[in-house]
Image: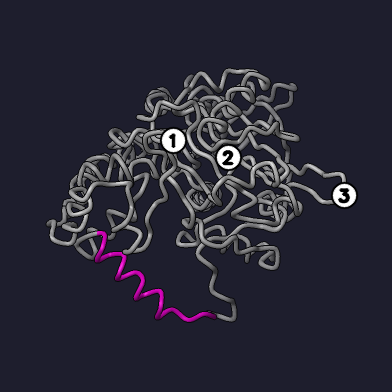
């Protein structure tokens, strides 16, 4: 998950292959770090929303997060801004039915807000098409604000007031900042968890097949060993799990096969800061598909978290695979050349990076279409006794979502085994 690159002066670059930080509105990462005893390793990376830009007409435009910036911004027309300001007066939809991100944002904020503002941000985060993506899976908090407060503006104000009333210290523990990360990267959380695990832990082991064996399941490893289990939790992507169970759980496997998984990857580039200092101090750039660029987004990691690069150096992470899926198939050299060309055109960065690292996840980024949670309910209902699923293919793609699902699945598996012993 995390890689370090040493520099010639004893410093190092810290590169996360996956998420760099975690939102604590979903408390699972913070709670797990507390449980593992590593809160002293938690770092506040600051605001994830400051200095964020959207590409419009080939030019980065800052996302306006204050009333003054919103009024002055060229990201939207005056008509589009007025439509957004009507949001508090739009009647809420409280039927609980799913809808696409595009339908929700257009209904509450207008089409221009979707195309120019909210859509690019969400597409940059979720690598998805807002016209098909489920609001209940991807951004349930927006529907919650509509259901509880009648709208987004009212909901945001209500949550801000509630946050001010919350104590800074609760049960002897400090309240978490809005975003957190770890001093040496996100892998610290995984390493702490692995260190605490008991039992027979096997890493990087491939499974040949799984099949029922009486009241148990037989797991045949590619190395030839056999494991017998009363319960199995599949934390693999749905397009992997379905192949492991298709011989004996056809209905669940068939439903899993309908969940699309897209290519995604990152390339992290190291520069001397003096070679990129003329670029505006951005933290991130979201690139809508309508711009027809080869990259999806970028984060200027060393601007957001200066400790991730030694003094005098810059670290930029570029995301690819959504706007141009074929980029995920390029070799490292061709990928680097294409990304450098994009950075030259978009940000004027002409310098050759001192070093770089590539991470690819082919067909690994799940897409939750409208009705996704109903599909997940069908999958869970069709699984044979003793089989459980968790992970980004199901009830949310974020690390907090996956932790929550993992805990829930573990509780179900434990209860299943207890009932089997008692019976």
Residue ID for mark 3:
9
Q: Taking the image as drawn, is residue 261 in sight?
A: no
Secondary element at image label 2: loop
The vertical placement of 117 against 307, above or below, is above
Which numbered tag is attached to residue 116? none
The colouring scheme, among rainbow, by chain, secondary structure or one colour, is one colour
Please tell me how crowded label 3 is: few (under 14), some (14-19), or many (20+) other residues with Cα within 10 Å. Answer: few
Please say if the residues under marks 3 and 1 sit with CB atoms less than 8 Å apart.
Answer: no
What residue is drawn where x is 43% and y is 78%? 166
Residue ID for mark 1:
127
In the image, is 1 to the left or to the right of 412?
right
Which numbered tag is attached to residue 230? 2
What residue is drawn where x is 47% and y is 23%? 324
Name the quadrant containing residue 163.
bottom left
Magenta region: which residues?
A: 152-169
Q: Could you tell which of marks 3 and 1 lies nearer the N-terminus? A: 3
Label 2 to label 3: alpha-carbon separation: 53 Å
User: Which numbered mark, 3 or 1, is in the foreground of this view?
Assistant: 3
The vertical placement of 194 against 349, above or below, is below
Q: Taking the image as drawn, is residue 312 in sight?
A: yes
Query: Of residues 420 and 324, which is closer to you in this image?
Result: 324
């Amino acid at each position: 998950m995390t890689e370090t690159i040493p520099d010639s002066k004893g410093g190092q670059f810290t590169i996360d292959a996956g998420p760099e930080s975690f939102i604590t509105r979903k408390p699972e990462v913070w709670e797990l770090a507390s449980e593992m005893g590593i809160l002293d390793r938690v770092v506040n990376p600051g605001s994830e929303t400051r200095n964020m830009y959207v590409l419009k007409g080939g030019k980065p435009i800052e996302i306006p997060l204050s009333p003054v910036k919103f009024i002055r911004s060229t990201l939207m027309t005056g008509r589009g801004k007025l439509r957004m300001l009507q949001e508090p007066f739009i009647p809420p939809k409280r039927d609980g039915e799913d809808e696409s991100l595009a339908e929700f944002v257009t209904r509450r904020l207008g089409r221009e807000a979707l195309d120019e503002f909210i859509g690019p941000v969400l597409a940059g985060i979720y690598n998805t098409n807002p016209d098909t993506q489920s609001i209940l899976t991807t951004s349930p908090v927006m529907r919650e604000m509509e259901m509880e407060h009648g709208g987004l503006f009212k909901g945001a104000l209500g949550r801000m007031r509630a946050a001010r009333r919350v104590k800074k210290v609760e049960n002897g523990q400090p309240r978490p900042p809005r975003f957190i990360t770890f001093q040496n990267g996100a892998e610290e959380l995984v390493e702490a968890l692995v260190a605490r695990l008991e039992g027979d832990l096997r890493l990087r082991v491939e499974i040949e097949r799984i099949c029922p064996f009486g009241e148990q399941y037989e797991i045949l490893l590619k190395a030839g060993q056999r494991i017998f289990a009363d319960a199995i939790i599949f934390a693999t992507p749905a397009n992997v799990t379905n192949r492991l169970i298709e011989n004996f759980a056809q209905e669940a496997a068939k439903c899993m096969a309908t969940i699309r998984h897209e290519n995604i990857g990152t390339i992290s580039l190291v520069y001397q800061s003096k070679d990129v200092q003329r670029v505006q101090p951005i933290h991130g750039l979201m690139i809508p598909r309508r711009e027809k660029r080869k990259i999806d987004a970028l984060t200027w990691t060393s601007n957001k978290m200066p400790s991730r690069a030694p003094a005098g150096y810059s670290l930029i992470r570029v995301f690819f695979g959504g706007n141009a899926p074929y980029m995920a198939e390029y070799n490292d050299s061709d990928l680097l050349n294409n990304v450098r060309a994009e950075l030259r055109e978009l940000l004027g960065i002409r310098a050759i990076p001192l070093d770089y690292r590539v991470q690819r996840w082919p067909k690994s980024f799940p897409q939750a279409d409208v009705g996704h949670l109903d599909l997940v309910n069908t999958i869970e209902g069709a699984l044979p006794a003793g089989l459980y699923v968790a992970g980004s293919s199901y009830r949310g793609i974020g690390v907090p979502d996956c932790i929550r699902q993992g805990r829930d699945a573990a509780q179900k598996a434990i209860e299943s085994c207890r009932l089997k012993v008692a019976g």
